[in-house]
Amino acid sequence: MYERILVPLDGMPFGEYAIRYATSIALRSGAALELTHVHIPAHLESELFAVPLFHYTGIAESDAAYDHELLEREREQLAGRARQLAERTGLEVTSQVVVGSVDRGVEREAEAFGADLIVMSTHGRAGMERARLGSVGDAVVRHAHSLVLLVHPPSDEAAAPERPVTFERILVPLDGTEFSERILDAAARLATLFGAEVRLLHVQTSPPMRTFRRVVRDEAGGEATLDLLAEEYLDHVATVYAETLPDASLEIAVAKSPLVGILESVQAWRPDLIAMATHARGGLTRMLLGSTSSEVVRAAGVPVLLMRPQDRAPARPVAEVVTAPSRA
């Protein structure tokens, strides 16, 4: 299951909303928690807004002293928060303040702590506000080697209830590739912990995105319909994961894009969690190709569990033609 869960906090009620989810998972799995805060030195703050410090030559002695005092206060406050949480829940809870940029700081601490799950809050902003503030959640996903659970606080960010949460429905979008299936084990673990129902979703787009492993031909030699391909694919996945996902339901949606299909499924089925694998691209590739997972995080309004597989999927043929019985 889960043994070590890292919870990055920013000192605001908004950030602490993630504790609600982390403690619920830890209480069921017996995991240890670590609360972490990334202290950003004053001379690095402008880098958060992509403004280079062309004239930076060093830190004034007075600024260094203030920065050190601030760092110590952050350590004391975080340690106190960890003690309170441990007393209230009975969990093993530690704290650690690290120095640097947020994404790299969380990445380093997750590796040092041995975290197998990172739980953090995200605004999920878009447009110019996103360009100005950036997305810490996206950055953490791009660099982390752990699973990352991104949660949305309520509209009233000052309200951060700490009552336990539960996952009753988990939606797993699959695009027909082995890459997307890497999230299934993680989804199965959470489903087992919470007794959740799992739905496997494939979104068929128009024009079709031909990502299936096989091209099925019927007995007459004609190519099977895309609906049949999707049905065969989801049936295959459900069979492979029958032991860990014994009661998974299957859904085939038709939409103009994977994002639209996922959001329509969210609206109709009302899942408590979406679980996805992500390429977590950055830079120009991200600008050109976009990122369905990032768009889902911003638009779905429910927690999203993301995995960035570290190894590449093994090479295999783009299409393997097999013959299947025709269906009346």
Image (cartoon, rainbow, N blue to C red):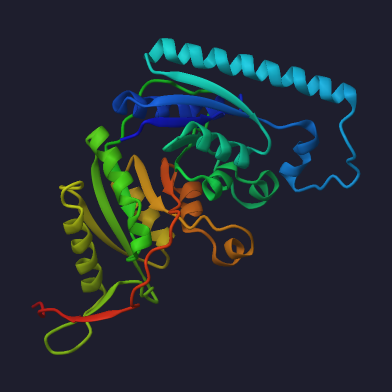
Q: Quadrant of the N terminus?
A: top left
Query: Which of these two is toward me, 323 or 262?
Result: 323
- Describe residue 90's horizontal placement relative to residue 9 as left or right: left
Task: Please say if 110 is above or below 131.
Answer: above
Name of the residue lying farthest toward the bottom: 221
Q: Considering only vertical position in the picture, is 36 above or below 295?
A: above
| Residue at x-position 51% and y-position 38% | 111
Give above or below for 98 relative to 325: above
On screen, residue 322 above or below 246 = below
Q: Residue at horizontal 61%, vertical 63%? A: 287
State the image quarter where residue 202 is shown: bottom left
Q: Quadrant of the C terminus?
A: bottom left
* Image-based side of 247 in relation to 82, left or right: left
Taking the spot 38% from the left edge, 18% from the top edge, the residue there is 91
Using residue 176 as the reference point, say whether residue 108 is left or right of it. right
Q: State the residue at coordinates (55%, 48%).
A: 143
Query: In the figure, is residue 4 to the left or right of 319?
Result: right
Is residue 48 at all visible to an observer of this figure? yes
What is the tally of numbered marks visible in this picture? 0
Image quadrant where residue 117 sits: top left
Rendered location of residue 183, percent (x, y): 35, 51
Q: Position of residue 66 (x, y in %)?
A: 81, 20
Residue 53 locus on image (x, y percent): 85, 44
Q: Is residue 268 visible?
A: no
Give the quarter of the image for residue 204.
bottom left
